[in-house]
């Protein structure tokens, strides 16, 4: 699906071999680590710092009327996606639903969240509908309606991790995962699940902890300098939003799914996977599965393997950090440093799907005019073409390397700052970070290898 | 399963990507062992 966006042309004339970029990136991380150890002696991100936007702009942006307008837009786009999926043409590229879900919603909202804060919260159709229903119920009952059940703490972000895993399964595993009708049905099923969750545990609680896409985009928005507090938009130190992320159960799993699914998407295009997957599929076929289901099961195993690999590598770093002392349990350390994986997840998403967003994102211009793919031309843009000359292959590679390096340096900063806050002894804090540096170098090398033409 | 020797060049490139990780882990292990020895001696 959308193969064209992943690699439009072959890189040529790079001044050094691709793998040397990996070495250079590792060197940048080591130098950054030393610089942090010398120049960043005290935690700087743990204390909250926030000031409202000047001139009352922040209050206008977060006002109830703007919230209602954004909510209506979100519900409209959601309805249009479902309608296009169920009633429109079943061609993947000619229907609004697949491009909107996999490119605009899933990819474009990531940079928007990093730049402008938690924008999805404003446009979230499930939250908008949930709040509207709660308002009607409150008005009718003339009283506040408390949630019937208290959200269990042990559940933490596990539902969100499961939700993102299911979405990745739909995207990377299901053979009909890009079919407009399948996407519309999946969206309806997920909506029903979300409404039940909100009805049981309350709209805001479910949105903050369990609704997969809210939690996903909120994690990325925590990198942003923009934050809304008490109905006012303001500015904070970049990255500081992640430093105050509540270490709830399921957070490591969620970030492992985020990084692992992108890793598997890259790995599935590599020669090792392509040489081993037919044998695994054949194994399942020999046990009675149809070729289609055997391949799906093979890819599902690959996806699970990718997630487990990322989680395992992180836990290796955590166990290493525990071995230097300090008296913290591995579980505590894993939770305390989980937020440092978010910039890595961003780096993986940005580097891997950069061209997909850039090229296939343009398709929304003609799909807006003809969402059902039946020949209409509502805005006069139905004949618009995708411009594949926007960026060259070499420039793409440089951007990808830059995303990977910047993401991992941001992760180092977050981990270093947390270590300083956690350990009483600054030397111990730095020593514990040797292991996190190993994790970062590992993820950097993996990211660049997955993006490279090696073994492709 | 066909991991072909003929494609050794591809595998060498892959190994080149992960050399920094291996080098770093080796350095980390040596440092850790040295520190433990020093701790025991003290």
Image (spheres, coloured by chain):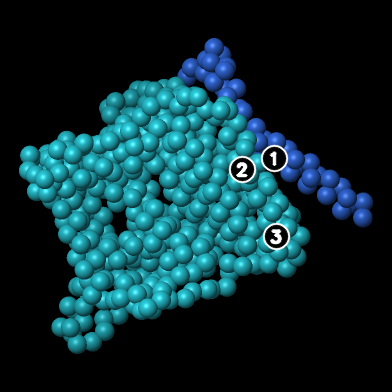
Chain colours: A cyan, B blue
Marks 2 and 3, how far apart in space? 21 Å
When the figure is inspected, residue A52 is found, relative to residue A171, above or below; the finding is below
Please report, as a chain letter, where disc 3 is located. A
Which residue is at the far front?
A55
Residues beneath discs 2 and 1 located on the same chain = no
Label 3 near label 2: C-beta < 8 Å?
no
Which mark, residue A172?
none
The image quadrant of residue A395 is top left
* Residue drawn 33% across the image and 25% down it: A285
Residues beneath discs 2 and 3 located on the same chain = yes
Q: Mark 2: give few (<14), some (14-19) or many (20+) Cα within 10 Å.
A: many
Marks 2 and 1, how far apart in space? 8 Å
Asked if one can make out residue A59 in the rendered structure from this viewpoint, the answer is yes
Residue A272's spot in the image, x, y percent? 48, 25
Which mark, residue B24?
1
Q: Which residue is mark 2?
A: A441
Q: Mark 3: give few (<14), some (14-19) or many (20+) Cα within 10 Å.
A: few
Please report, as a chain letter, where disc 2 is located. A
The image quadrant of residue A277 is top left
Which residue is at the far top?
B6
Using residue A231 as the reference point, say whether residue A394 is left or right of it: right
Mark 2 vs mark 3: give the one in front.
3
Residue A349's spot in the image, x, y percent? 43, 45
Q: Secondary structure at mark 1?
A: helix
* Residue drawn 64% across the image and 58% down it: A416
């Amino acid at each position: 699906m959308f193969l064209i966006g992943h690699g439009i042309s072959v890189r040529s004339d790079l001044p050094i071999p691709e793998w040397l970029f990996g070495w250079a990136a590792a060197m940048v991380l080591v130098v950054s680590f030393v610089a942090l150890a010398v120049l960043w002696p005290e935690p700087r991100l743990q204390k909250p710092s926030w000031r409202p936007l000047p001139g009352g702009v922040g209050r206008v942006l977060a006002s109830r009327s703007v919230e209602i307008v954004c909510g209506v837009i979100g519900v409209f786009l959601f309805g249009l996606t479902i309608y296009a999926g169920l009633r429109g043409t079943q061609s993947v590229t000619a229907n609004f639903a697949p491009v909107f879900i996999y490119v605009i919603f899933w990819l474009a909202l990531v940079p928007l969240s990093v730049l402008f804060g938690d924008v999805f919260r404003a446009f979230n159709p499930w939250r908008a509908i949930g709040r509207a229903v709660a308002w009607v119920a409150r008005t009718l009952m003339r009283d506040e309606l408390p949630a019937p059940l208290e959200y269990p703490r042990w559940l933490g972000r596990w539902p969100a991790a499961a939700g993102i895993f299911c979405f990745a399964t739909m995207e990377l595993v299901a053979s009909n995962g890009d079919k407009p009708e399948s996407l519309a049905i999946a969206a309806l099923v997920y909506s029903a699940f979300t409404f039940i969750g909100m009805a049981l545990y309350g709209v805001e609680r479910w949105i903050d902890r369990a609704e997969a896409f809210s939690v996903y985009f909120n994690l990325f928005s925590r990198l942003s300098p923009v934050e809304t507090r008490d109905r006012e938009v303001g500015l904070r130190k970049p990255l500081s939003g992640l430093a105050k992320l509540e270490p709830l159960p399921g957070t490591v799993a969620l970030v492992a799914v985020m990084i692992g699914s992108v890793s598997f998407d890259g790995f599935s295009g590599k020669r090792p996977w392509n040489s081993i997957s037919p044998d695994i599929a054949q194994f399942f076929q020999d046990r009675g599965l149809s070729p289609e289901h055997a391949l799906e099961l093979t890819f599902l195993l690959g996806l699970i393997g990718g997630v487990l690999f990322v989680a395992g590598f992180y836990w290796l770093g955590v166990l290493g950090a525990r071995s230097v002392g300090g008296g913290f349990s591995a579980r505590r350390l894993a939770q305390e440093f989980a937020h440092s994986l978010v910039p890595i997840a961003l780096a993986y998403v940005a580097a891997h799907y950069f061209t997909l967003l850039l090229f296939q994102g343009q398709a929304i211009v003609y799909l807006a005019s003809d969402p059902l793919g039946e020949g209409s031309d509502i805005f006069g843009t139905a004949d618009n073409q995708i411009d594949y000359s926007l960026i060259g292959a070499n420039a793409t590679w440089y951007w990808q390397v830059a995303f990977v390096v910047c993401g991992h340096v941001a992760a180092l900063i977050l981990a270093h700052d947390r270590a300083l806050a956690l350990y009483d002894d600054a030397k111990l804090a730095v020593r514990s970070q040797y292991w996190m540096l190993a994790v970062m170098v590992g993820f950097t090398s993996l990211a660049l290898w997955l993006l490279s033409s090696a073994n492709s | 399963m066909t991991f072909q020797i003929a494609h050794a060049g591809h595998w060498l490139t892959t190994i080149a990507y992960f050399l920094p990780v291996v080098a770093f882990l080796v350095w980390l292990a040596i440092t850790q062992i040295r520190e433990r020895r020093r701790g025991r001696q003290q």
